[in-house]
């Protein structure tokens, strides 16, 4: 077999492969036999018809295609290995010249991995944002704990306050039309933690149980429904019930109620958790800093084809997330143009491709490999996150092999990040203030 390699633009490579006559003839004869097993010809048992009759029935060109399909996996693998090509897509035949009794000439197009030029990525001192201790962290943690274990008391002797929980009926209209989805009965609303339209919850303060009234609001300019953006609306309200949140006292009795021996043990556990959370946040900042240094220092030319493939994959993931949230693609297009969305997705695709290529390059340079326990750890994490058993995960991988590839990439990302952490010095600095003006 003879192979010549032609480098084309943007990492496309053309393989011109010449397969000797005898090998091509053997492949053709094998193809005839395979096809004959599926062709019925009067007067002959299946698979026993003469070659000439099989050729007449299915056509010589069809047999040639079958022969090439049978040859290509082995032939292309040998050509790729011989020329040390690092492929990122499946090879495909672009043309062939197959004349029986002569050498078979096949042209195959492949796309190779772009060359990554690494900058400095180890033995450096890299600054990462520190995570200072917050003086009010413990108090906030206790307040959150109190809120979780708060009790509710029915209120009958006063008007609503800004911290109450109310049960309401409401019915909204705008520009003389009822608002789709703007009506409910027996709706529970926490007035102190409302995600309703600005001004809605505030106008329910100072009302009595059983009281009926109207409130006026204006939808935000960035509201998801194009028809309601910036529009005024009126809601008819009825207060069915008022409940007051009663926060518990923080003492030994409360500590025992939430699972601790006493108040001191509860305080010790909270402070330990806060410190652990702070250390985890510092580590994440450090990992992001060393990873950013490695990525920013590397250079790689990414073809438009790679970006478009990755963008289409990201788009599919995006649409799935929208669907899980009950938002259709058509609904989204009412708030943003498709061009704007795709431009953002393409930029994300470039980042994801470069990250992946740089990680793989560092892994290759430093001889970082995956062990069985690395993949097992990802299985465990996936199972914990989604409540799946190992058998469930294996079944899912059987249906979608890309899951295993994704888990392997995640595992390699983790190992490379750990390598970068182990081979660089981290200097924690005070985080810069963000100017929100």
Image (cartoon, helix red, strand yellow):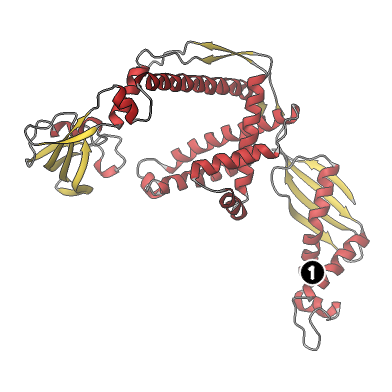
Depth check, front residue: 301 or 132:
132
**Could you tell whether 341 is left or right of 178 in the image?**
right
Q: Which residue is mark 1?
A: 63
Residue placed furthest toward the bottom: 43
Position in image of residue 421 (x %, y %) = 63, 21
Depth check, front residue: 253 or 141:
253
**Could you tell whether 24 is left or right of 91 in the image?**
right
From the image, which quarter does the C terminus lie in? top left
Q: Residue at x 65, y 40 (%)?
A: 375
Residue placed furthest toward the front: 261
Crowding at dot 1, Cα within 10 Å, few <14 / some 14-19 / many 20+, comes out as many
**Could you tell whether 151 is left or right of 392 in the image?**
left
Position in image of residue 271 (x %, y %) = 42, 18
Q: Quadrant of residue 39?
A: bottom right
From where the camera sits, is residue 147 visible? yes
Q: Quadrant of residue 47?
A: bottom right
Q: Residue at x 65, y 16 (%)?
A: 424
From where the camera sits, is residue 200 visible? no
Q: Residue at x 80, y 89 (%)?
A: 43
**Could you tell whether 149 is left or right of 325 in the image?**
left
Position in image of residue 87 (x %, y %) = 73, 42
Question: Where is 269 relative to 397, above or below?
Answer: above
Position in image of residue 415 (x %, y %) = 65, 30
């Amino acid at each position: 077999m003879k192979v010549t390699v032609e480098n084309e633009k943007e990492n496309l490579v053309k393989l011109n492969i010449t397969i000797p006559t005898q090998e091509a003839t053997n492949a053709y004869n094998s193809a005839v036999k395979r096809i004959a097993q599926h062709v019925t010809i009067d007067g002959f048992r299946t698979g026993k018809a003469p070659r000439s009759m099989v050729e007449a029935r299915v056509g010589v060109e069809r047999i040639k295609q079958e022969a090439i399909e049978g040859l290509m996996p082995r032939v292309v693998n040998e050509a790729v290995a011989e020329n040390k090509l690092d492929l990122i897509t499946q090879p495909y035949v672009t043309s062939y010249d197959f004349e029986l009794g002569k050498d078979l000439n096949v042209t195959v197009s492949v796309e190779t991995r772009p060359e990554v030029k690494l900058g400095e990525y180890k033995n450096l001192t890299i600054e990462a944002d520190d995570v200072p201790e917050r003086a009010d962290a413990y108090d906030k943690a206790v307040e959150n704990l109190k809120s979780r274990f708060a009790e509710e008391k029915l209120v009958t002797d006063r008007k609503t306050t800004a911290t109450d929980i109310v049960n309401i009926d409401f019915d909204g209209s705008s520009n003389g039309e009822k608002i789709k989805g703007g009506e409910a009965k027996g709706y529970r609303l926490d007035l102190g933690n409302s995600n309703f339209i600005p001004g809605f919850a505030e106008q329910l303060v100072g009302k009595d149980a059983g009281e009926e009234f109207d409130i006026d609001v204006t939808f935000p300019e960035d509201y998801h429904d194009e028809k309601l953006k910036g529009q005024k609306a009126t809601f008819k309200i009825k207060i069915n019930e008022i409940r007051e949140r009663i926060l518990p006292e923080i003492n030994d009795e409360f500590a025992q109620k939430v699972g601790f021996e006493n108040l001191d043990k509860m305080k010790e556990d909270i402070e330990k958790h806060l410190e652990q959370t702070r250390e985890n946040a510092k580590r994440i900042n450090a990992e992001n800093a060393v990873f950013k240094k490695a990525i920013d220092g590397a250079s790689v030319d990414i073809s438009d084809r790679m970006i478009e493939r990755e963008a289409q994959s990201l788009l599919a993931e995006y649409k799935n997330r929208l669907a899980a949230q009950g938002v259709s693609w058509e609904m989204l297009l009412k708030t943003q143009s498709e061009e704007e969305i795709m431009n953002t997705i393409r930029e994300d695709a470039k980042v994801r491709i470069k990250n992946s290529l740089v990680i793989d390059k560092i892994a290759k340079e430093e001889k970082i490999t995956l062990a069985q326990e690395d993949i097992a750890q990802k299985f465990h994490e996936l199972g914990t996150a989604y409540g799946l058993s190992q058998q469930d995960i294996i079944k899912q991988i059987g249906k979608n092999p890309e899951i295993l590839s994704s888990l392997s990439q995640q595992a390699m990302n983790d190992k490379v990040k750990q390598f970068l952490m182990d081979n660089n010095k981290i200097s924690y600095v005070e985080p810069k203030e963000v100017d929100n003006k």
